[in-house]
Image (cartoon, coloured by chain):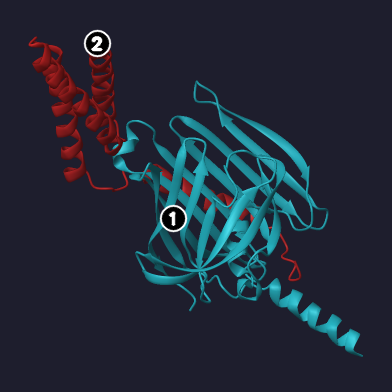
Amino acid sequence: MKKYFFVFTLFCGLYSFAQNETIAFGEKLVFSASYNMSGILTDIAEVKMETSKVKTSKSILMRLKCSAATYKKWDNFFKIRDLYESYVNPKTLTPYLYKRDISEGGYYKFMQYKYNHKTKLVKSLKRKKRKDGSTWDENKNVKINASTKDIVSTLYYIRSLDIHKASPGDQQNFTVLFDNEETTITLKYIGKEKISTNIGSKECYKLAISIKGSDVLKGTNSNLLWLTADKNKIPVYAKFKIPVGNGELKIKSATGLKY
Amino acid sequence: MGKKLIIILGFVVAILAVILAVTPLSNLAVIPIIVAFVCGLLIVFMSKKDNTKTKSIQYIFLLVIIALALTIYKSVYYTSEVGDTEQLEQRDEENLEDSKELLEDIDIDEDL
């Protein structure tokens, strides 16, 4: 009997694990990205994370949108106007469509993934611009795992996890589809920490991120993410060690929160 | 020998300071400005000791002053604001319309 009870609670746990109780429609988070070299900060871009409701004739989806735009002083040197979006099931945050539309200093790239979770296939479309302005497409079918998500939905999915149940040192792997390849991202819970942010002093969950088989992020435990230790789990601060210094992402404002 | 080395170092660093001050990374120009200034001072002291006059001191200090003025001006008058996002907003809307069409035939599985 005890065994059945255990299995039952485990399933309940798993079920609640997969439910989104954190992210609401109409949430808007604004960040400022900066480059840090030996303690001197230089503002680079403004990053926004927004959610909204998208209605189709059959269903309601949640649109997760991340956009990045460089500040004015950078525009003449290196203008970035990036758009990342993912259309997900509002209850489970499972993605159905992903789009990445980036324009970085004259370089343009468009990626689109259309998921089919039944056949575990992703129809991928890559569009690039030639020098003369015309575009070319590349279509591909990519086989994915059951839990594979794109980068945007993974970011939001992390927030929906029950971090309060984790103990320091716990790890979880996430499979992320990026540039038509599945990459494993490992998230490690380090502990709680109180930090001061633009939206007040917050008790936060401190998480370390690492990418398997990639050297984009340097060092162990030096790529960190702070999520507020409340029901909203807002990402308030992030720190990345890249080959040419440190990058930082600081929250500027948070509106439309659920709690 | 030592003096020549400091003069060359001072010049290189002072030029680097001016270059950095012109780019949006003007905050970082502070480091080479300090280094160039120190080099300049060293040359002044060395010249006083040898009783020689070195023209390079004036050039190094001139470059330092230009870099410093640019850096201060930029940090005072430049605020962090986003430039034109019209094109981004337009792409955003186009993508949303296109996505709605693509999602029209999708059935959401509640369990997934």
Of residue B76 and residue A29, the one placed in the foreground of this image is B76
| Crowd rating for badge 1 (residues with CA inside 10 Å; few <14, some 14–19, many 20+) | many
Relative image position of residue A207 (x, y in whole percent): 57, 61
Q: Which residue is mark 1?
A: A48
Q: Quadrant of residue A141?
A: top right
Is label 1 on the same chain as label 2?
no
Q: Which residue is mark 2?
A: B4
In the picture, the quarter occupied by the C terminus of chain B is bottom right
Visual hue assigned to chain B:
red
Indicate the secondary structure of the residue bearing disc 1.
Answer: strand
Relative image position of residue B59 (x, y in whole percent): 14, 17
Residue at 34%, 64% (x, y): give it: A198
* Left or right for A189, reference A122: left
Visual hue assigned to chain A:
cyan
Answer whether residue B93 is visible to the viewer in this image. Answer: no
Residue at 21%, 23% (x, y): give it: B39
* Left or right for B54, reference A237: left
* Left or right for A255, reference A182: left
Of residue A10 and residue A18, the one placed in the foreground of this image is A10
| Image: B40 above or below A126 | above
Answer whether residue A177 is visible to the viewer in this image. Answer: yes
| Crowd rating for badge 2 (residues with CA inside 10 Å; few <14, some 14–19, many 20+) | few
**Amino acid at dot 2:** Lys
In the picture, the quarter occupied by the N terminus of chain B is top left
Residue at 71%, 57% (x, y): give it: A173
Indicate the secondary structure of the residue bearing disc 2.
Answer: helix
Residue furthest to the front in view is: B49
Count of number-bearing discs? 2
Relative image position of residue A117 (x, y in whole percent): 77, 57
Q: Quadrant of residue A195?
A: bottom left
**Amino acid at dot 1:** Lys
